[in-house]
Image: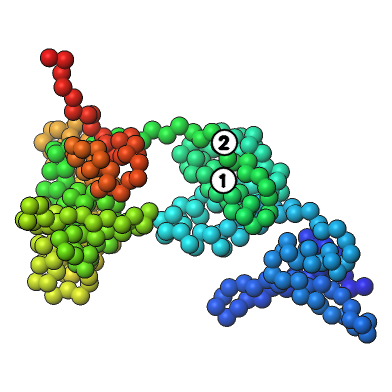
Amino acid sequence: MRAKKAANRDLPPRMIRRVRTLKGGKEWVGYYYDGRNEDGKRVEIPLGGDLEIAKAEWAKLDCKPVPKKGALLGQVFDRYEREIIPGKAPKTQSDNLLSLKQLRKAFSDAPIDAVTPQIIAQYRDSRTAKVRANREISLLSHIYNIAREWGLTENNPAAGVRKNKEAPRDFYATEEIWSAVYAVAASELRDAMDLAYLTGQRPADVLSMREADAVNEFLQVSQGKTAKKLRIRLTAAGNLNDLGTLVERLIEQRRSRGVRTPYLIITEDGRQVTKPMLRLRFDDARNKAIAIANKAGDGVLAASIRQFQFRDIRPKAASEILDLGDASRLLGHTDKRITETVYRRVGEIVKPTR
């Protein structure tokens, strides 16, 4: 009898795995039963491309019990990376891949049903990056939920495992800090800061705003992270509000420069401002502001400016809108508690005793 290839050692007897690389670069996998026809000649009987279904078909042909499912988590990780992650937002994809890299180190060789909540808790406690550990456990929980849908397991040992405590970022960019950076910023950075503050949107959403998004007195926003759709008013009582005035200026700026790019935030030579470009310009302005503060002998202000990041503009906007409900709706949150606990970084205005 022909010796079983090393590539098929994880399969039941007489089952064969065939792997082909398609023209598009994708890998095709098929399973076959090494059988005989009526004339006794060897034939390969197709069993399909799903391993568990193929094992069930193999059992019918070989008259054996269906092998117990015992996928290794490494195999589940591979399938999750191949089938689930590509359907997520780009930033979520990169974050998932980063978490998956760590999970593979600890769990790849473990059978899917051998992992217990205690093991996951030990993994959590052993990680020095506590916040990253939370993200990794959340991803592992989702992987188990998907694996249940695939019929690979009936349990999710990550469900209910306690996460590490996280302290929300509480930096608030005061008017002094804002003005120090704004004063030395490039014109496109000032435009981006203004648009981010007045819309309360994430940096990526600000950079993706286009002239065509300004429709019928509204700026239409589709948030990249959540796909939440918003219409932000550009007028108040029939007149342009501050956001409407800014958007009108940015549109006129595009047209006067004769640029073809549809985006609102552009450089002086008409190029779209990308995330790396925004980061470089913000870092440069912040460093200049720090140098000016140090030269003036104001080390406290310099230290505060050093903490300022572009992403702090969104919580600054949320903090400076008096009504919590208005702030929550502008940020696109479905739960006011998220706005209040994570994005409101100044104390609530209250009346004194007398």
Q: Secondary structure at mark 2?
A: loop
Evaluate whether residue 266 shows in this view. no
Q: CA distance from mark 1 to mark 2?
A: 9 Å
Q: Which quadrant is the C terminus positioned in?
A: top left
Q: Earlier in the sequence, mark 1 or mark 2?
A: 1
Evaluate whether residue 133 shows in this view. yes
Identify which residue, 238 or 142, lies in the foreground. 238
Residue designated by label 1: 141
The kind of residue on which mark 2 rests is Val
Q: Which quadrant is the N terminus positioned in?
A: bottom right
Q: Position of residue 244 (x, y in %)?
A: 12, 57
Q: Do tag 1 and tag 2 residues touch (Cβ < 8 Å)?
A: yes
Determine the residue located farthest toward the bottom in the rendered image: 39
The kind of residue on which mark 1 rests is Ser
Q: Is residue 324 left or right of residue 139?
A: left
Identify which residue, 281 or 189, lies in the foreground. 189
Residue 12 in which image quadrant = bottom right
Determine the residue located farthest toward the top in the rendered image: 354
Q: Position of residue 245 (x, y in %)?
A: 9, 57
Residue drawn where x is 28% and y is 43% of the image: 328
Check disc 1: other Cα within 10 Å, few if <14, some if 14-19, many if 20+. some
Residue designated by label 2: 161
Give the number of callouts: 2
Identify which residue, 127 or 314, lies in the foreground. 314
Residue drawn where x is 23% and y is 56% of the image: 231
Identify which residue, 110 or 147, lies in the foreground. 147
Q: Secondary structure at mark 1?
A: helix
